[in-house]
Amino acid sequence: MSIISKITILTTTAEKAAIAPALAQLAAPTEFSSYGEDQWNFLLQATNVDALVISNNHDNSTKQLLGSLLRIRYGRHRAYGMMLVSKEARGQGLAKKLLREATKEDSDADTMKILGACSELGRPLYEKM
């Protein structure tokens, strides 16, 4: 497996629209296979949704999306969901890295964090957090 690059947080409409095809591809072999590009665009276009993504460290022509997580902001509260990690990258701690990055700015005791429902595949991560 390639060296992992840093996590990127996508917040602008253009950034989120550009990543939708890759998210649909990442979701295809998972329980989210019904989420095509249109469904991802619908989720991502809300102004209170950030997409956290992690990819391998190749140049842009061969870069591969390895994982993603959506963060939804409701005032001081946060919800997290749609966690995806490619089959090839599982077991390397990417889901944990994504979740830690998403929650690190939410250390305020008054911030309520909601971890959404998860699949059986994601259950161990959520139980550890």
Image (cartoon, grey):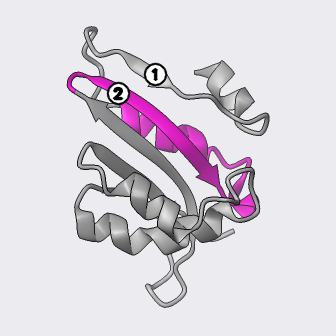
Measuring 29% from the left and 16% from the top, which residue is drawn there?
111
Q: Quadrant of the C terminus?
A: top right
Measuring 77% from the left and 39% from the top, which residue is drawn there?
121
Q: Secondary structure at mark 1?
A: strand
Q: Quadrant of the N terminus?
A: bottom right
Magenta segment, which residues?
75-103
Choose between 30 and 1: the one closer to the eye: 30
Q: Is residue 1 left or right of residue 73?
A: right
Q: Are marks 2 and 1 in contact (CB under 8 Å)?
A: yes
Examine the structure image and report whether residue 55 is included in the region drawn in magenta. Answer: no
Q: Which residue is mark 2?
A: 78
Label 1 sits on what residue type?
Ile
The picture quadrant where one finds residue 56 is: bottom right
Q: Is residue 90 left or right of residue 109?
A: right
Rendered position, 96 above or below 8: above
Rendered position, 11 above or below 118: below
Measuring 52% from the left and 38% from the top, which residue is drawn there?
81
Q: Which residue is mark 1?
A: 114
As measured in the structure, the alpha-carbon distance from the residue carrying label 2 to the one carrying label 1 is 6 Å
The location of residue 115, given as percent across then percent down, is 52, 25
For this orientation, the residue located farthest to the bottom is 61
